[in-house]
Amino acid sequence: MQDASAWMLALAGLCVGVTAGFFVRLARLCSFGAVEDALMGGDTRRLRIFGLALGIALLGTQALVIAGQLDPGQSNYTAPALPLISIAIGSVLFGIGMAFVGTCGFGSLVRLGGGDLRSFVVILVLGGAAYATLRGMFSGFRITVLERFAITMPEGVNTDLAALTQHLSGIDLRAVIAALGGGLLCLIALGDKRLRRTPRLLAAGVALGLLTVVGWLATTKLADPFAGPVHPQSLTFVSTVGKAVYAGLLNVANFADFGVGTVFGVIAGAFIAAWHTDELRWEAFDDDHEMRRHVAGAALMGFGGILTGGCTIGQGITAGSVMALSWPIAIVGMMFGARIGIAVLVDGSPRELIRRRFDAWRELLQRRRAPALTAANRPNHRPAAPSDAPRPTAPHSLAE
């Protein structure tokens, strides 16, 4: 019989997921939409909401650490080594896939709760690719090739900012960094008057931040230490989606997991919100081109999400809340990848994008190599008189 504590964790994850899915669906909050608004339209409001969530999660999580209720060194985000190449490549791939699908793994779960059957295909492909990269046919390449290029921390130091600064300075600055970083992120979000007039967005940001803290606390307190080493976790939607797909297909016992519980909880919460607002709509692919794009994007998100160690929620909020050094690398890579994906979609295909960029660079080089206009071929230029030509004499003055 499955350990009772594992099912308690799954139930806690279900409750956390229901709450997250409900508030995010109600606010129509989307991480890719936030990035797209900022990159293409200069509108940072939704991006500020994710900053608010990170600020709250950072303050709450570090309060747990300072109170001795959470050991960040036991989480998967703060290992003794930083696989820099894996994170960089994976985050870019995840960003491209996110652009192809139009949302991330978390957003796909929210859409599925509202009746979007395209997201059902996305979830299956994303989960399969994630599990294949985590423990299946791609795991060997990930471990033996990509993760070999890692920056090893000094002995006894994990890859989180507070531990590293303490090692370098000899002073524990965890509380100072958390207060300054979390407080600044909250002020940046709440300082926008337009956001203060959108309570649904604010509620979603506050909910994501608080639920991240709840996830850390639940997986620490409800885990059974006699069943194995305790690895605290919180909201993330790549490996957990893969585990959920695996549990549904092959091993029902794997449903007893906090992360798997959050996956089904988000779908249920989004369904409740969509039903409450009368927005339940069955949606499917318009054509085969759209389906191919979604399938390719889902595969890239599954593969890239495992390489980078999380999604826009897992790295963007959860890893950031424990000050993981992977956080800035993953976020920059995801935004860069999303920009590439948007460019590919606008140009129609990767081949067309490369052709247009090549033509633009060639034209620029030709302009630089073109000879500059000399004095002889400038318009309205009068050639200088030869040196042996008679020079005109100055006119006489009236006095002479």
Image: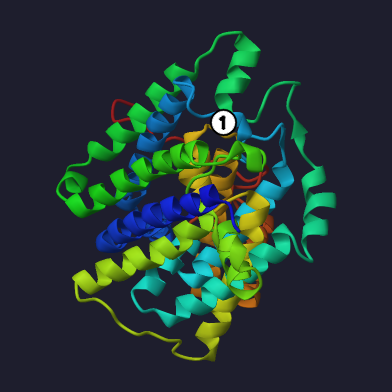
- Which residue type carries mark 1? Pro
Against 102, residue 158 (above or below) is: above
Q: Which sits in the foreground, 349 or 259? A: 259
**Can residue 100 be spotted in the picture?**
yes
**Can residue 301 be spotted in the picture?**
no
Q: Where is residue 170 in the image (x, y as percent from the top left)?
A: 61, 8
Q: Which sits in the foreground, 235 or 8? A: 8
Q: Where is residue 298 in the image (x, y as percent from the top left)?
A: 57, 70
Viewed as shown, does residue 3 lie left or right of 262? right
Please name the residue that numbered disc 1 is placed on.
Answer: 72
Q: Which sits in the foreground, 3 or 113? A: 3
At 65% from the left and 43% from the top, the residue drawn is 227
Disc 1 packing (10 Å; few <14; some 14–19; many ≥20): many
> Which of the 4 image quadrants contains residue 110?
bottom left
At 24% from the left and 47% from the top, the residue drawn is 202
Q: Which sits in the foreground, 259 or 53? A: 259
At 63% from the left and 73% from the top, the residue drawn is 350
